[in-house]
Image (spheres, rainbow, N blue to C red):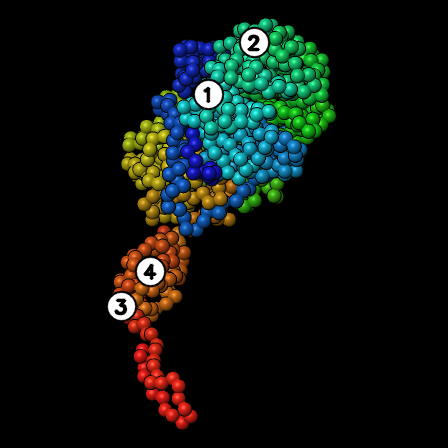
Amino acid sequence: MKLPLFYLFIIIFLFTSELFAQPWMSLIPKEKADNPGFYEQQKAFNEYWKDKEVTRSKGWKQFKRWEAFMEPRVFPDGNFDNTALFREFNKLNTRTTKGINSSNWEQLGPVDVPINQLSYPSKGIGRLNCVAFHPSNSNIIWVGAPAGGIWVSNDGGSSWSTQSDLFTNLGISDIEFNPLDPDVIYVATGDGDGSNTYSYGILKTEDAGASWDAVFPLSIASGNTIRRILVNTSDPDIVLAATSAGIYVSVNAGITWYNKQSGNFKDMEFNPNSPNVVYASSYDYYGDAGVYKSTDGGLSWTQLTNGLPLSGVGRIELAVTEANSSMVYALCANTDNGFYGLYRSYNSGGSWSLASSSPNILGHAEDGSEAGGQAYYDLALEVSSTNENILYSGGVNIWKSTNAGSSWSLNAHWYGGGGAEFVHADQHFFAIHPISGDLYSCNDGGLHITSDGGNNWIDLSDGMEITQFYRIACAETSSSIIMGGTQDNGSIKYTGGNWYKILGGDGMECMIDYNNSNVLYGTFYYGSIQRSSNGGNSFDDITPYDAGDGAWVTPFVMDPENSNTIYGGFKEVYKTTNGGSSWNAISSNLTNGELLHSLAVAPSSSSVIYAATYDKIWKTSDGGLNWSEISDGLPSVSISYIAVDDNDPQKLWLSFSGYLSNRKLYYSEDGGVNWINWSNGIPNIPANCVVHEYGSNDAVYVGTDLGVFYRSADMSEFMDYNEGLPNVIVNDLEIHYGSGKLRAGTFGRGLWQCDLYVIPQAPEADFQANLTQIYEGDNVEFTDQSTNSPTEWQWSFSGGTPNSSTDQNPNVTYSSPGIYPVSLTASNDGGSSTITKEDYIEVLINPQQLNADFEANTTTIQEGETVKFTDLS
C-alpha cells in the first residue's frame, strides 16, 4: 500500500565530511577519515590555511558555508543527531496545538529569475543538483534542488510545479526514471555536493510523484551520502546507488540492497548498448580516486588501472555516448580540485590514454591560467550522443572540446568573460536529452539549456521557487519593498511586483532605512557591508576597515532613534553615526577573540544593546561604555538570535540552535539577570531566529528547521504556525506592521508571508438536536452551533450512550424513558463557554405493538340476516 510521505518511516542523515575532498582533509589521520567529527574537520581547515593567503575561490567559501550551517547545529560537542528531524517531524504531524485561525502562508518569490541590475551578466534563482527526462515524452523534465525539492515541467521547461513540499526536508541529489515504466521514479535525497541540507535516503514513487516510499534502509543510509542512481534499461528491477559507503545494488526494485563494492563513489554510467556493463568512479581526498567496471550489472567490480593515474586524483566524473558505446571518458580533478587530466578509453575501459591536462578547465579564470579549483563541489562531464569527439566539461565554467578532449575552448563563463556566453557559476550536473539531444546544465543559478552546441544558452529557471535566503528586510514605509540576502545569487530586492538582483556574490544580512526606502544595506559573507542611497542602483563599501572578518552572516542593526546610526557585530561591536562613513568600536576585548553572531538594540532605548557569540551573551545599558556578561542560566547550545521587547529594554528572548531537547527559546524580564525556559512546544530541532510582535502580550514567532512556531504570554506552549508553508528551514523572520504580515526567508523555497496571529474570541457555546422527543432506543444527532470557531468540544449526555463526547457533532442513543439535560463546553485559544439545556431530550415508552384481528359468527348469510363481529386484537 502506498502512503503519503509524511507517514513513512524514512531515514534522515546529514551529508558529512567526505564532501570536502580538499587538501586540508589529508591532515586528518586516516584512521579517522571515514567519519571525522566537525571540530576535527574545522581544525584541519584552520591548520591548512593558517600560513597561507586565503583564496576564496578554491573551496574556501564552500567549506565556510558548510561550517556556518553545521557549527550551530553541533555545538558544543561536534555531534549531530542524524535522526532528530524525522523523529520530530512525525511528532509534529500528530500534535494538536495549532492555531484555529490558519496561518495561510503565501509565496512571495522569487518565482522568476530576478532581473539583473548589475553592470555584468549575473542571473540566478537557486542551485540545482540534477535533471532527469521522461524517456518517451520530451516535454516532461524533473529537476532536483539541494534545498528546494523536486520541480517538474510538463511543457519542456516553460513552467514548473513542485512535487515535494510534504517531504520531511527538501534536499535532492539525483533523480532517475524507470525507462520501461516512467511513472516509477527514484530520488536520492540530500545535498550531495554542498552538504547544506538533510537527507533521508532514497525515495521511490510508482505513480509519478503522487505518493512516495522510502526504499533505502537505516543501516545503509545513516551518515552516508548518495550522489547517483541508475536503473537498468533492460531489467528495471535492478537499481544501483553510488554512495559514500560503496556501490549498492537492488535486484527487486529497491526492496533490498546489497553492498557490492566498498569505497566512496560519486558517479556511475551504463554502457549505452549493454546495461550489464557499468562504470563507476570513486572519490578520495587523499588522492586515491579511481575508475571501476562491472560486467554483470553491478554485482562485481574491478578497478581499471591500465593508463589511469593511481594517485593524486580526488574526484572523477565519467561520460559515455551512444555514438560509440566503447568510448569512455574520465574527467579527473587533483587534490587541489583543479584539472588533473581528461582520460579516454576506446575499448570500454580496457586501456586509457591522457587526452589533455591543461588549461585548468576547472578554475575560475576565463583562460584556464589559475591553479586549483573546487571540483569537490562542482564537477560535470557530458559527451554528445551523436558525435563521440564532442565533450563538455563543467567546473566553475563550461568548456568544450571537439577533438575528444585533446584541446578545450571556453564555452560559457560565470560573468560572460572571454567572449563566452553567460551561464551561472558552478556546474553540478550535465545531461543530454535522450530525444532532442539538447544539453542541460544544473548549476548554482538554476537550469540552462543549449540546442546549438553552446553557441547560445537559455535559462529555464523561471517558475522554480528555490531561492536560499540567509536574511530578509522589509521597508517600513511600503509593504511592497523587500530585500534579501541569498546563497549563490547575491542580494535581491522586491519592488513593483518584480525581483531585482542588486548585489552579486552571496548575500547575507540586509537592512532598509525605516525613513527612506531608497537607502539599502547589504553584506557579503564575513561582514563586507555595502550601502546604497538610490534604491540599489549602486553601492558603496562601508565596512569598518579595522574590524577584521566577521561571522559568515555578520549581524548588523539600525538604531531605532536615528537611522544613520548602525551597529555591527564582529569580534567587537562597532558603531557608526553617519551611515557608515566612519566607525568606532564601542567594546574592548568583549569576546576574547570570538566572533559575534547575534546583535540587538532595544527599540525603546538605544543605549541598551545585546551582543552574543554562540555560547555567551553581553549587555550594555550605556551605549557601549560598559558591558556585562549575562550568560548564567543559559543552556549549552548555540545562541542563534536575539529579540527585544518594543517597550521594555530589559525584556528579551534568545533562540537556540542544536538538538538539546526543550532548550530552544529562553526569556528574561530583567535584562538577563534571570532566564526563563520558554521552549515548551517547539520540537527538538534547531531554532534559527525569533521575532517579537510589538504591542502584543509577549508574542513571539520562532523560525526553525521545520517551519514557524508561535506563542504569547496567554499560552502555555508554542503552537505550529505552518499552514501552507513547505517543510523547509526558516532562516529569518520579519514583521511588516503596516500590512499586518509575518514574512519568512526560507533556505530553499524563497520568501513567504502570512497574516499575524490573532488571538480568537472565546466561543459562545450553542447546539441543536435533530429530535428532542424520541422513543426509547432511538438515536439523536447533535450539531454544534457555537460561534467564534471553537477547536475543542466537551459534551455531557445524562441517560445517553455515550454519556460524553469530544466530537464536534456526536450521535447519542437513549435507552431509558425520562427527561434529560444536555451540556456542551466549547473551547478555543481565546477561552471556553458552557451551555446546559435542561429537560432537553424526552424519551417516551414505546407503545405496545398491536396485531389487529377479528371473527364473524358466520360468513355466509341470506339477504336480511345479521352477522355478529367479534374483535380479536
**Disc 3 or disc 2, which is closer to the eye?**
3
Mark 1 and mark 2: span between their CA atoms? Answer: 22 Å
Mark 2 and mark 4: span between their CA atoms? Answer: 76 Å
> Would you name the residue on which mark 3 appears?
817
Left-right relation of 119 to 41: right
User: Which residue is depicted at the point 50% across and 27% down?
Assistant: 252
> Would you name the residue on which mark 4 appears?
812
Left-right relation of 383 to 172: right
Q: Amino acid at mark 4?
A: Val
**Whether residue 268 is situated above or below residue 845 in the rendered picture:** above
Label 1: state its secondary structure: strand
User: Which residue is depicted at the point 66% across and 10% down?
Assistant: 346
Label 3: state its secondary structure: loop
Q: Are marks 3 and 1 in contact (CB under 8 Å)?
A: no
**First in sequence: mark 3 or mark 1?**
1
**Whether residue 411 is situated above or below residue 152 in the rendered picture:** above
Q: Are marks 3 and 4 in contact (CB under 8 Å)?
A: no
Q: Can residue 68 be seen at all in this image of the molecule?
A: no
Which dot marks residue 258?
Answer: 1
Q: Amino acid at mark 1?
A: Tyr
Given residues 314 and 237, the one toward you in this image is 237
Q: Amino acid at mark 3?
A: Pro
> Would you name the residue on which mark 2 appears?
304
Which dot marks residue 46?
Answer: none
Location of residue 295 (image quadrant): top right
Within 10 Å of disc 2 (Cα), the crowding (few <14, some 14-19, many 20+) is some
Within 10 Å of disc 3 (Cα), the crowding (few <14, some 14-19, many 20+) is some
**Disc 1 or disc 2, which is closer to the eye?**
1
Q: Are marks 3 and 2 in contact (CB under 8 Å)?
A: no
| Residue 721 coordinates in the image, percent (x, y) | 43, 44
Picture mark count: 4
